[in-house]
Image (tube, rainbow, N blue to C red):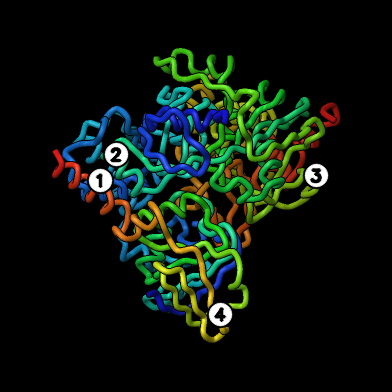
Amino acid sequence: MAMTITQRILAMHSGKDEVRPGDIVEAKVDLALANDITAPLAIKVFEELGVEKPFDREKIALVPDHFVPNKDIASAEQVKMVREFARKYGITHFFELGETGVEHILLPEKGLIAPGDLVVGADSHTCTYGALGAFATGVGSTDLGVTMATGKIWLRVPETIKFEYKGRLRPFVGGKDLILNTISLIGVDGANYKTMFFTGETVKELSMADRFTMANMAVEAGAKNGIFEPDEITREFLKDRVEKEGLWLREGPESTFQKEYVIDVSSLEPQVARPHSPANSVEVNELKGIKIDQVFIGSCTNGRYEDLYNAFQILKGRKVAKGVRLIVLPGTPTVYKEALQNGIIEGLLESGAVIGPPCCGPCLGGHMGILAESEVAVSTSNRNFLGRMGHPKSFVYLSNPFVAAASAVAGEIIHPKHVLGASHD
Amino acid sequence: MIKGRVWKFGDNVDTDVIIPARYLNTSNKQELKTFCFKDLIPDFSDRIKKGDIILAGENFGCGSSREHAPIALKEAGVALIIAKSFARIFFRNSLNIGLPLLEVKQGLDEVEQGDEMEVDLKTGKLFVKEKNISLDVKPITGLEKELIEAGGLLNYTKNRILRSENRS
């Protein structure tokens, strides 16, 4: 039986010639990460194990990004605990405020992940790194604590579902729309325990930012990981970031997939997921006219430079509608700086946006930009569960940055072409 | 043998509902348990009794990787979660902290909130007297059983480290 990319990475990391779906393997980890919410529990587990030191201080990344700058005393204590742990063991990749950003944007930017790597993170969106052809999956804090001690993790080898995208994308349609549409097709548990393999002529043209967005949301269909074949676009992104060559794996004609979808996206319109599920997406026009109170542009899904650039294309020279709050959080200090140097930050400020520090912000309803009862938001993040962004009776619609920006201008959910004018029809 | 009252839930219960993110600024287990289902059932942590059982539909525990979710449930008193299916990170987190889970696809639809249920994890025997239900479900085996018996991945790993030290 020919193995898929995911199977080959798992086999290589567990010292086996072959692994089959359903096998449980103990695999060596190339990078283990945690954030300010999940690291404290992991550190407690690590300390209780009583080992002398972490398995490799250069293969652990600790990223305070959820409740920073510290939102209250309790959060400050959590970050302090992570900082002290990092100091005690000389953890190379601890990111202090000023260096830190949204973990899944920051770590690839810093060149910490190469194709073929095995990455586990105490954050469900760790699957983002599959965009680089790595096996990356979210785990809990106990897993992470044990991995920090042993350098290993138990994993069940997943089946792979293949998603082949065909056709040229329409204007204002990108990775976010492909993945929202795919999740609506298969449901929030449509890929539970499985690998989502993204391929096809459409995907081969996609930028790294779009691929990160797609891999990021694989978990919203329940997937263990999402994966792309690394190519020239990947190589361009990795240039000057990653020293090691990595394993450049591709699916062969004999790779065994549990299921295959061929999706023609040539007529796909921008997608918006209605409350309270990422699988509730419909074409933006179906929701036209829904009044909104807040727009959030940022998060590990859409807080990259390209996302801010796209939003700016809509907002340039326009004002945020009266009564609407637009919150923009650049994903990392580098993203912030690039947007600043290219006039995007200034432009967004002139439109009426508030620019916040690189962090997760309102995405998970803990910090900066919480919704009140009955408020409605459009967000470029990945989840719109009940109460996700604040009050249990608030409502979150998920979209790409073009739609989010256009909606901020109109004060209601709208297709970007209607904000830009007739020439974009 | 686990014996407790049933708390019934539907499909796709996510970890934001089990414990909203705004309460994740602590890793204190005693505090975490008081926030369990805070938005959905505000008095859940007062009403739950030690040994109670959660009975849910498909994809229980979907969403975030927060281990705070199974920790809050376990500390609040939940002894077992039965669902038609579990989201994968929640599944491994629960085993890793020694909270048993059973996947049961059929035969429990008529069970109601508050019914008394008895489950023997070793044999897979499940009873709901009020509904005359007697089911044979797949018992927990393999690595999952070892994790539950050890009380979670922490103890399981400790034991392994001890064993390898004794060998060398």
- Nearest the viewer among A366 and A320 is A366
- Position of A324 with respect to B167 (left or right) is right
Q: Which residue is mark 1?
A: A46
Q: Which residue is mark 4?
A: B133
Who comes first in sequence, dot 3 or dot 2? 2
| Mark 3: amino acid | Asn
Q: Are marks 4 and 1 on the same chain?
A: no
Which-is-in-front pick, marks 3 and 1? 1
Q: For numbered disc 4, what is the local secondary structure?
A: strand
Q: Are marks 3 and 1 on the same chain?
A: yes
| Mark 1: amino acid | Phe
Which-is-in-front pick, marks 4 and 2? 4
Q: Are marks 2 and 1 in contact (CB under 8 Å)?
A: yes
Residue located at (72% from left, 37% from top): A261
Question: In the figure, A417 relative to B129: above or below?
Answer: above
Residue located at (54% from left, 24% from top): A339
Task: Give residue B16's position: percent from left, percent from top.
Answer: 50, 57
| Mark 4: amino acid | Ile
Q: Which residue is mark 3?
A: A285
Q: Chain of mark 1?
A: A
Q: Which residue ends up furthest to the bottom in the rendered image?
A: B130
- Real-space CA distance between mark 3 and mark 1, rounded to the nearest whole angstrom: 50 Å
- Real-space CA distance between mark 4 and mark 1, rounded to the nearest whole angstrom: 43 Å
| Mark 2: amino acid | Met
- Nearest the viewer among A244 and A61 is A244
Point out the image quarter for the N terminus of chain B. Answer: bottom left
Task: Give residue B151's position: percent from left, percent from top.
Answer: 30, 60
Q: Are marks 2 and 1 on the same chain?
A: yes
Q: Which residue is mark 2?
A: A148
Task: Give residue A27's position: percent from left, percent from top.
Answer: 38, 35
